[in-house]
Image (tube, grey):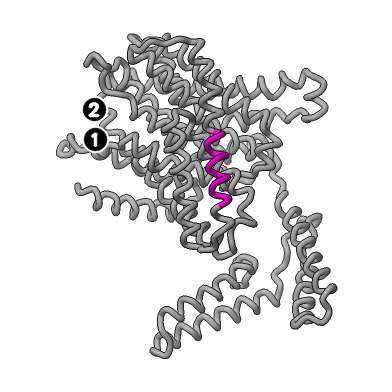
Amino acid sequence: MHQVTLILLLFTLTTALSLAAVRVKIPYPTAMVLAGLLIGVAVYAIPGFNGWSVRLDPDVLFTAILPPLLYGAAWNTSWNGFRSNLRPILLLAIGAVLFTTTGVAALSMLLLPGFTWAMAFVLGAIVSPPDAVAVESVMERMRLPRQITLVLSGESLVNDASALVIYRLALRAASGDEFHLAQALAQFPVVALGGVAVGLLLAFLLHQVHQRIEQPLIETAMTLLAPYGAYLFAEELHVSGVLAVVVCGLVLSRHSSHLFSSQTRLTAVALWNFLTFILNGLVCILIGLQLPGILRQLPASLGVVLLDAAALCAALILLRLMWVYAIAYLPRILPAIRRREPRPPPRQVFLVGWVGMRGVVSLAAALALPMRLADGSALPGRNRVLFLTFAVILFTLVVQSLTLPAVVRALGIETPDEDRCEEAEARRLALTAALDLLASRPNSHGNTMLASLYTHRLENLSDCRDDTPPRPDPDQILHRDSIHVQRNAIVELRNNGRITDELLHRLERELDLEESRLPPAAAHPV
């Protein structure tokens, strides 16, 4: 099948599956993985398609897909939340990866005949890090306590860097190269700090450029180039490209309010929402489509490798739970930590341990394994690692994500609407500041009308202490209806040939921006 045709078909499938996922209320990555899996099973079972497969190039995954997905996730991560939870984030992003990798390596040596310790650590490093995009996409449909979402989001951004460092060191040993543990341990902080430095440097340079220009399309294009530049530059210096992308995204997001104009932010947000949606959907479908090629290369019977996969998935869950409970309670033996950080409820700790979806990084690392060693012999255990990685991704994206709502309900975890209180307070302070400005300029044109508008909005702010949802404001409903009437009028003018399409789009955009500032349309009576 022609590549362009295949990409167009996958785009179409992504859109259709996303709509279906919304209707059945499941995370769209889960729906896409399942769809890809069903297509893969059908292809594998149909005799006429025995040779058909969709091969993912790991270089494309690492360099073309991973950077923008990480950058988008970092952009939406709270810097204050990341900084305030730095200790648990690092304990999960580094400690949990090391602990899980070691545990998986030990289990592999027991279960998988012919595995070397080097290949066992390769497998452990591949399956140990939860994926940032997978975690974000699953959690966005859940109202989880903010502390949990901050820790999980921060962990999934950083853990790829530590896992990839272990992966490369273990792969070097598996390929027969000389390996020194002391040198490997010394290399880890250099790679990590180097990636952070590259991200900070690029963020500083982009900050200077954005301050000096105000061209929405050019600045939006720069936001698209930033993750690729950070990743490729860091990898060229042999430091962590993942950390470079994450740090660059965190820093620029922190300063985006004064760096970008409102027009630039509207354009960039629209582009990035579309880009992350398409890339995430494509990757999830392609994960499922890898099944035919992986099954054809299995070194043992399907029943045996399925048992191995089940044991590995169970071990990953147990290892993560063991580590999460350990870091949640053991450090609080120290009085200083106990005073600064309250003891977390065991139910919330269990939830952090349960959420561990794997995704694009694990898949790309497994596919990047070389087929042969330097001497021309086949890399031992490669096909089994591919299948086990696929099984782990499938299990975590389907079983764990679909059972997450039931787990939350069974644990009885309260999910208060914390954002509503903050939103009401922020709106109150912003409107008060605007009214203070108007009071300082009593003779300004339009002062009375603006003061009346802001006062009306201030009086109609909902009290966050009131648990009842705010009632629809008749003035807001009238405002929305007036926008709809204006839009219909200019469309009618265009249809009658009295205005051009260009003018229609310009006027329509103004009305769209005005409507976007109103409450959701769900408040409008049917």
Residues packed near mark 2 inside 10 Å, few (<14), some (14 to 19) or many (20 plus): few
The residue closer to the viewer here, 131 or 523, is 131
Spatial CA span between label 2 and label 1: 9 Å
> What amino acid is at disc 2?
Arg
**Residue 493 visible to the viewer:** yes
Q: Quadrant of the C terminus?
A: bottom right
Q: Which residues are magenta?
A: 196-208
> What amino acid is at disc 1?
Tyr
- State the SS at label 2: helix
Which residue is farthest left? 48
The residue closer to the viewer here, 165 or 189, is 189
Quadrant of the rendered image containing residue 228: top left
From the image, tell me which residue sits under label 1: 44
Give the prevailing secondary structure in the magenta stretch: helix
Q: Check if mark 2's residue and mark 1's residue have beta carbons within 8 Å.
A: yes
Side (left or right) of 423 relative to 374: right
- State the SS at label 1: helix
Q: Residue at x 76, y 63 (%)?
A: 430
Query: Residue 440 at x, y = what percent?
Result: 84, 73
Query: Residue 313 at x, y = what percent?
Result: 46, 24
Q: Residue at x 48, y 29 (%)?
A: 239
Query: Residue 454 at x, y = what percent?
Result: 76, 72
Q: Disc number at residue 296?
A: 2
Number of numbered labels in the structure image: 2
Q: Is residue 131 magenta?
A: no
Residues packed near mark 1 inside 10 Å, few (<14), some (14 to 19) or many (20 plus): many
